[in-house]
Image (spheres, rainbow, N blue to C red):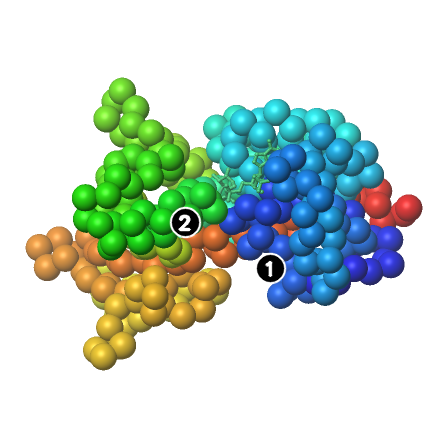
Amino acid sequence: MKRVRDHAAPRIVLVGATGALGATVLELIGELGVRYRDIQLVASPRSAGRAAPVGGRSQTVVSLDDADFADADLVLFCTGEAVSGRWAPAAAAAGALVVDSSGAFRTDPDTPLLVPPVNGHLMERYPGGIVAGAGGLTVPLVLLLHDIERRWGVRQVVLSSYQAASGRGHQGVEELLEGSELALRDPDAELPTDCFRPAQAFNVVPAVGSLLENGSSTEEQHLVQETRRILDLPHLNVAATCVRVPVVQGHSAAVYIEAGGPVVRRDLVELLASLPRVVVHDSEPPSGPPTPLTAGDPDLIHVGRIRVTPHNPRGFWLWLVFDNLRVAALNLLQIAQTAQARPPRARTRLGESAHR
Ligand SMILES: NC(=O)c1ccc[n+]([C@@H]2O[C@H](COP(=O)([O-])OP(=O)(O)OC[C@H]3O[C@@H](n4cnc5c(N)ncnc54)[C@H](OP(=O)(O)O)[C@@H]3O)[C@@H](O)[C@H]2O)c1
């Protein structure tokens, strides 16, 4: 992590710095050597006064009520919808570029919803304000579909997810671990259900988010809407069943894709292996398919079990594994980077900071 005197480097405010995603963003800022002039760590009043390590130094977390957006160039919100929905507009009104990780603005037609390698060009003319980062499951899916669509076209996508407890933040992880310990000690114990209902320990629950009247879950609905929007394919036939599994970190998904024309497996493997954020696990056992425990590099999307269906050469299956926190955090930072790379005329505060 680099605090620099360079006046072109942004002043950053990270809201939700103590959460699962916020802590991962901080980790990545350090690992990638992201340059900043100043960084303020913000969380709820519960965490105010707590010390957090930043760039080898200890920094005090402040409560959102005491956050100073007035001088910020970039405000990253790693908070839930209610907090982002209320505070992100205030930060944007103060002149900062706001990158929000929640679902609060993802369906707002005036707010860009970005996965930069796919639709980062939308930032070129965006003057500033709020930008939404895509959901943790959407990011890897659209990164793959983007290139598959360009090569063969995509007619249909059917996805089943196996989502980790960390997708529900720190509390979700704590609840899974606490419930698992309790259940191991006493199979009849009453397990905590504050985050997951029914209890998640030793259980598989096909309801991520809440269930809607139409039978879908909010997570499934978001995945469909976000995928269509980011790929700019408003009528793409996408269906999903999102399932929470008792894994601490790392989402998995089985994805069936029907392309616009016949797909040769070798060409598909070659295309996937050529993508910058993708690693193909196509070797014989014992390495076998990727899993959340064994996949390796947490910043990549691990793809295995690549199968073209014998009865339909347009259809094929992929098995995906990815670190939900690292992939989402990286996407937020890529959005910030894309915003900074915009032509000066398109920028507001980020551009002005270069002349302070
Ligand atoms: N987890 C993932 O895999 C993932 C992936 C993509 C997107 N997201 C999205 O990212 C957001 C954060 O998720 P998370 O998993 O990091 O959740 P989390 O672990 O529960 O963290 C929530 C953060 O928000 C802060 N917060 C809560 N109430 C607040 C308030 N009133 N004022 C200021 N800060 C407040 C918390 O501070 P305290 O510690 O003080 O409570 C904490 O820092 C959510 O919108 C989620 O949908 C998460």
Mark carried by residue 126: none
Judge by depth and name the residue closer to the eye, 84 or 41: 41
- Alpha carbon distance from label 1 to label 2: 20 Å
Query: In the displayed structure, does residue 257 sit left or right of residue 124?
Result: left
The amino acid at mark 2 is Val
Residue 7, given in percent of the width and then of the height, sits at: 86, 53
Q: Secondary structure at mark 2?
A: helix
Vertical comparison of 238 with 51: above or below: above
Query: In the displayed structure, does residue 176 sit left or right of residue 116?
Result: left
Residue 196, given in percent of the width and then of the height, sits at: 33, 38
Q: Are marks 1 and 2 in contact (CB under 8 Å)?
A: no
Judge by depth and name the residue closer to the eye, 134 or 315: 134
Disc 1 vs disc 2: which is toward the camera?
2
- The residue that mark 1 highlights is 28
Query: In the displayed structure, does residue 309 sit left or right of residue 180?
Result: left
Q: Secondary structure at mark 1?
A: helix
Query: In the displayed structure, does residue 24 sit left or right of residue 57?
Result: left
Q: Residue 126's image quarter?
A: top right
Quadrant of the rendering where the N terminus is positioned: bottom right
Residue 55, given in percent of the width and then of the height, sits at: 72, 62
- The residue that mark 2 highlights is 173
**Label 1 or label 2, whichever comes before in sequence order:** 1
Write the residue at 54% across / 27% down: 82
